[in-house]
Amino acid sequence: MTKYVNAVINDESGEGGLPVLEGTLGPQAVDIQSLYSRHGLLAYDPGYRSTASCKSAITFVDGDAGILAYRGYPIEQLAARSHFLEVAYLLMFGELPSAREAEGFREAVCQHNLLHEQVISFYRGFRRDAHPMAIMVGVVGALSAFYHDDMDIRDPEQRINAAIRLVAKMPTIAAASYTYSTGRPLRYPRNEYDYAANFMQMLFGMPNRDFVLDPVQARAMDCILILHADHEQNASTSTVRMAASSGANPFACIAAGIASLWGPAHGGANEEVVKMLSEIGSPENIPRTIARAKDKGDTFRLMGFGHRVYKNFDPRAKVIQANAREVLGHLGLENDPLMAVALELEAIALKDEYFIERKLYPNVDFYSGLLLRAMGIPTKMFTAVFAVARTAGWVSQWLELHNDATHGIDRPRQLYVGETLRDYPRDRRG
Ligand code: SDX
C-alpha cells in the first residue's frame, strides 16, 4: 500500500516543517537537508527533475518562459553585444569587467594559452582517427599531472589561476585534437587574434601560408562560444561539481565534465543532428523521421529537439538559427539542402500534436551543427567546440563551489531495492 506525505506550504515556520527557500528568480525550494536526520526519510528524484543540487548565482534559466541569463544579463543581449572573453570574465567574477580588468584578463589568458611541449607529445599516443572528445578527455585530465603538486586549491588566487589556465588552453587543446587527426602540425596560438579568431586560426591555419581570417565566421564562432558558455546545473556541470566536491584537481574535474558532455543526449547532440539531417536527405523523408521519433517502440529521438528544462523555445536556438542563415548566405550556401531539411522539419514538428503536447522545441544543438558545418568544422569536432565554450561555465561553477566554505562532498543516497540480508552458504568455499 503506497503511503503519501502531504506537503503543505504555509507561512508559519511550524515545528517539524521543512523550510521553504526563496531564490531571487525562479521556483522556491523545499530545504530537505534534515529529512533523513530528523525523519529517517530520503527524497527520491532519479534524473533530478525536481532537485536543486546547490545555490548558484551564475546562470538563470526559465524553461517555461524561454529565458537564459548569465549573471542577470539576457543571453540575446550578450550574444549581440558582448564577446566571449568578456562573458567568461562575467561568469567567473560576477560583473562585467572594466577596461583595465578586461585587458588584464585578456593578458592572463594569452599568457596561458600555450601547451607544455610534453603535453603535445600525448597526442602522438592517440590513433589519428581518435574522436577529438576522447583526446580532450585524455589531454585535459593529463594536465592535472602538470599542475597538481604546485597547486593548493584552498588558495583563492591559485584557484583563479587554474580557472584561467583552463579557459586559455582549451582552444589550443581542441584545435590540436583536430589538426592531429589531419596529419597537420599543431598550430600555436597567436596573441594578435582575439579568442574566437585564435581558435579558428589554430583549427584551419597552415604553416605554409598566412591565415586569412573571415570576420563574419570569426564573429559567428565568438557567438557560438557565448551561447554555449554556461547553462546552470546541466549534466556536465553537475559532473564537474560532483568531482570538485571531493577536492579533486580542477583539470581532472573539467576532464570529467568533458566526458559527460560527450554523450549524445547532451553536448554530443549537435553531431547527431547533422547525421540525422544527412540521413533524412530531403524534405519528403521528414514524415518517416517524425513517425520514428513518435514511435514508442523505436529508440530513435529527434536530435536537437526537447530539453529537460526548456518547455518553450531554447533562446539560444533562435540566435543560432539567425547566425546559421547569415553565415550560409555569406558563403553563398543559402540553398544548403540540410538547412532546408532542418527548417522544414522544425516547421512540421512544431505543428505536430506529439511535440506540442510534450513541449518539445528545437534546442541549442538543432542549428549549431549546421552553422559549424558551414564554417568547415568537421562533425566530429562539434562537441569539442561546445567543450571549449562550456569550460568558462564549468570553471565558474567550480570556483563558486570552492568559494562556499560550507560545501562538503556530494554524496547522494539511494532507494535500495536489492536482496534482503542473507547468509553465505555454510557448505560453500569461494
Ligand atoms: C543539451 O541540460 C542542459 O542544460 C543541456 C544543454 C546545455 O546547454 O548544457 O542545454 C545542452 O544537452 C541540449 C539537449 C541536447 N540533446 C538532444 O537534442 C537529444 C534529443 N533530446 C532528448 O534526448 C531529450 O529531449 C532530452 C535528453 C534533451 C531531455 O530528455 P528528458 O527531459 O528526460 O525528457 P523525457 O525523456 O522525460 O521526455 C518526455 C517525453 C517522452 O515521451 P513520453 O514518455 O512522455 O511519451 O518526450 C519525449 C519522450 O519520449 N521526447 C522525445 C524527445 N525528447 C523527449 N521524443 C522524440 N524526440 C525527442 N528529441
Image (spheres, helix red, strand yellow):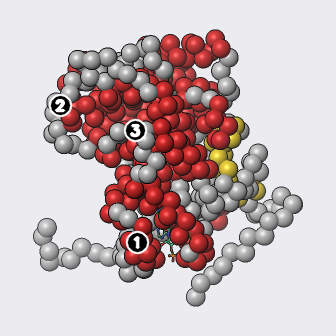
In terms of depth relative to the viewer, which is nearer, 32 or 128? 128
Crowd rating for badge 3 (residues with CA inside 10 Å; few <14, some 14–19, many 20+): some
Q: Does 56 sit left or right of 364 as displayed? A: right
Marks 1 and 3: which is nearer the front?
1
Alpha carbons under labels 2 and 1: distance apart: 39 Å
Q: What residue type is labelled 2?
A: Gly
Marks 2 and 1: which is nearer the front?
1
Q: Does 146 sit left or right of 25 as displayed? A: left
In terms of depth relative to the viewer, which is nearer, 219 or 23? 219
Crowd rating for badge 1 (residues with CA inside 10 Å; few <14, some 14–19, many 20+): few
Residue 83: image x %, image y %? 57, 28
Residue ID for mark 1: 284
Q: Which amino acid does label 1 sit on?
A: Glu
Among the two numbered marks 2 and 1 on one chain, the one whose residue lies closer to the N terminus:
2
Quadrant of residue 40 in the image? bottom right
Residue 92: image x %, image y %? 58, 29
Q: Which residue is drawn at 40% across and 38% down?
A: 375
Alpha carbons under labels 1 and 3: distance apart: 27 Å
In terms of depth relative to the viewer, which is nearer, 200 or 281? 281
Q: Is mark 2 on a helix, strand or loop?
A: loop
Asked if residue 120 can be seen in this view, the reply is yes
Q: What residue type is labelled 3?
A: Met
Crowd rating for badge 2 (residues with CA inside 10 Å; few <14, some 14–19, many 20+): few
Residue ID for mark 2: 183
Residue ID for mark 3: 375
Picture layout, residue 161 above or below residue 257: above
Residue 201: image x %, image y %? 36, 24
Picture layout, residue 329 above or below residue 64: above
Q: Which residue is drawn at 73% across and 60% down?
A: 18
